[in-house]
Amino acid sequence: MGEYLLRCPRCGSLQPPSALGCANDDSLLRTEYVARRLTLRDDLPGLWKFFDWLPVKEPLRGVGEKPVTFRSEGLARELGLSRLYISFSGYWPERGARMATCSFKDLEAPPTVERLMERKDGQALVVASAGNTARAFAQAASAAGVPLVLVVPSSGKSRLWTTVPPSESICVVSVTGDYTEAIDLAGRLAGEAGFVGEGGARNVARRDGMGVVVLDAALAMGALPDHYFQAVGSGTGGIAAWEASLRLIGDGRFGSSLPRLHIAQNSPCAPLYAAWTGSAAPQGPCPGGMYDEVLYNRKPPYAVPGGVRDALEETAGTVCSISNGEASVAHQLFEEAEEIDILPAAAVAVAALQRAAASGSVEKKDLILLNITGGGVSRAKEELDMFMLRSDIEAEPSAHTSASEYGLLAEIEEILGRRGPR
Ligand SMILES: *Cc1c(COP(=O)(O)O)cnc(C)c1O
């Protein structure tokens, strides 16, 4: 039942259960679950059915839907593929998908919040995002009553909504400036006593939560796919897919070959593509002008042991870079073929698959998994309640001022303390 060890993939040493890194090197630690065979927990809802392979001691009640996997007809026909499966993370009740904030960040946030609560040290979680990550964490923290500080660039405030009333223990700090300033400020805040960062790719709860996509798909397909397609920013979802596949191979019932990872970025803001192909690093005002800004990450975990490069090398993977024009064509193609709206990021993955099908790098009869990482926002807005999060503090940080110095810390603590965590 979620029992695990944390091991360093490079030096093999065991690390303490809440560690975010190895004491000897900079690798991404990996969970090693006691259960080698995946037993679905049908008594638990949503993603908690995969409890055996999630690094938590309890499910978090009230949050944690799972994606759905289905065999495509419409898109498969358009692309001339006969065994295309789609994993859909979002809101599409007709197919049984009820992920309320409409992206696969809804797989990362609940296990991360639960794992933090299990430490019982009452720290406030700090998250920098104005998009899918912010919504997912706001939703999970509201279900758990966990104190959460969301640091958002002021331009992104309108994208902050939840489908449950946001809990009193969320403090929204909106930062004048761009996403980079929000990340920097969140990093400084997370270093203060009483605050903790969510850990990004280093947090196994985030990666194993995202791994549910491949677990759910393998159960639906009866085997591991030959190919896995996903649009990436940090590439964490790709790493998670690789790790989940390794675990499924260990289980023994799903085949013995790793799926080829096909990860897609959005040109020209495509640092992982640049690193993998050795081409020039992105220039210009990234993420400005991107088809979806969620696909840009300044410091993706590329070269660290257990990171994106290792995942690509071990799976004979590919990285492509998709233009806004290609994404837009693929976006329309998908929505017409499958009759559901998808997030722009997911359209980039569709474009990558479209390219691969056209070039013959996947074959008609290959077993293919396309990860639609977000969608159904229009459906959700029709059917669900929407609550906007308002900003509690407007901050104008300068890069060299520590969070405590300009009084921000005291203000946040007052807001969280005044409202109380529970
Ligand atoms: C975060 C996100 C991605 C990229 O995820 P990685 O962390 O790079 O794997 C893709 N699509 C959507 C909708 C996202 O929210």
Image (tube, grey):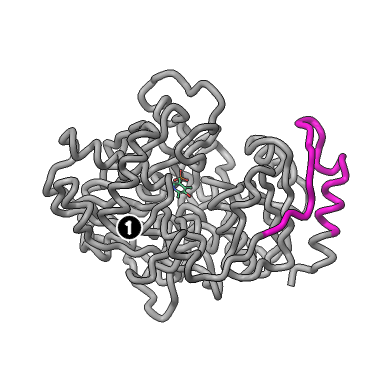
Q: Which amino acid does label 1 sit on?
A: Ser
Would you say 82 lies left or right of 276 here? left
Side (left or right) of 195 relative to 279? right
- Magenta residues, as a range? 389-414
Q: In this view, does 67 lie to the left or right of 62?
A: left
Residue at 68% across, 69% down: 145
Q: Quadrant of the C terminus?
A: bottom right
Q: Which of 286 and 264 is in front in this view?
A: 286
Which quadrant, please, contains the N terminus? bottom left
The residue lying furthest to the bottom in this view is 43
**Taking 179 as reference, is 421 above or below it?**
below
Spot occupied by residue 329 in the image (x, y as percentages of width and height):
31, 40
Q: Is residue 179 magenta?
A: no
Q: Please report the residue visible at 56 percent of the width from the left and 70 percent of the height from the top.
A: 385
- Compared to residue 256, the image places residue 154 above or below, namely above
- Give the residue displayed 43% in from the left and 31% down from the top: 272
Query: Residue at position x 51%, y 21% from top?
Result: 283
| Picture quadrant where residue 83 is located | bottom left
Is 403 inside the magenta-drawn segment? yes
The answer to which of 369 and 266 lies nearer the viewer is 266
Q: Where is residue 364 in the image (x, y as percent from the top left)?
A: 12, 46
Q: Residues within 10 Å of mark 1 (few under 14, many from 20)?
A: many
Residue 156's place in the image compared with 166, above or below, is above
Secondary structure beneath label 1: strand
The residue beneath circle 1 is 87
